[in-house]
């Protein structure tokens, strides 16, 4: 007599696998956000002043 092989996963184990994957993805996302915040991006040292009065006069 052979034992019956049960290929179908139980509902509890499939839900547990899905929850585990979601938790892992969320943890990776949070870690990624923290690592991106640690990077210092260069910012301009001087403010640019753009004269648009000539452009306005040309449009009139």
Image (tube, rainbow, N blue to C red):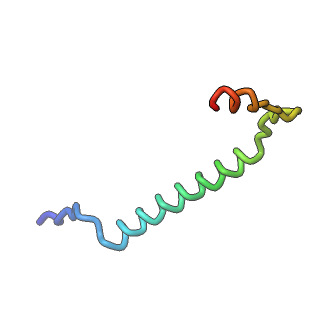
Identify the residue shown where x is 66% and y is 52%.
31
Q: Residue furthest bottom?
A: 12
Q: Nearer the viewer, residue 57 or 33?
A: 57
Q: Residue at x 31, y 72 (%)?
A: 11
Horizontal placement of 37 versus 21: left or right? right
Q: Give the residue drawn at x 78%, y 31%.
A: 50
Which quarter of the figure is the C terminus placed in?
top right
* Residue nearer the viewer, 22 or 2: 22
Up-down: is 15 above or below 25? below
Q: Give the image location of residue 5, x and y in percent.
A: 20, 62
Q: Is residue 15 above or below residue 33?
A: below
Residue 42 x %, y %:
80, 33
Q: Residue furthest right?
A: 45
Residue at the far left in the pictured view: 1
Label tally: 0
Image coordinates of residue 22 in percent, x first then y, are 48, 61
Q: Is residue 3 left or right of residue 22?
A: left
Q: Residue at x 28, y 65 (%)?
A: 9
For the N terminus, the quadrant is bottom left
**Residue closer to the observer: 3 or 22:** 22
């Amino acid at each position: 007599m052979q034992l019956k092989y049960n290929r179908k996963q139980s509902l509890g184990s499939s839900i547990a696998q899905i929850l585990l994957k979601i938790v892992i993805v969320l943890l990776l996302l949070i870690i990624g956000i923290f690592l991106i915040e640690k990077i210092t991006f260069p910012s301009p040292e001087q403010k640019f002043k753009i004269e648009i009065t000539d452009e306005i006069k040309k449009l009139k």
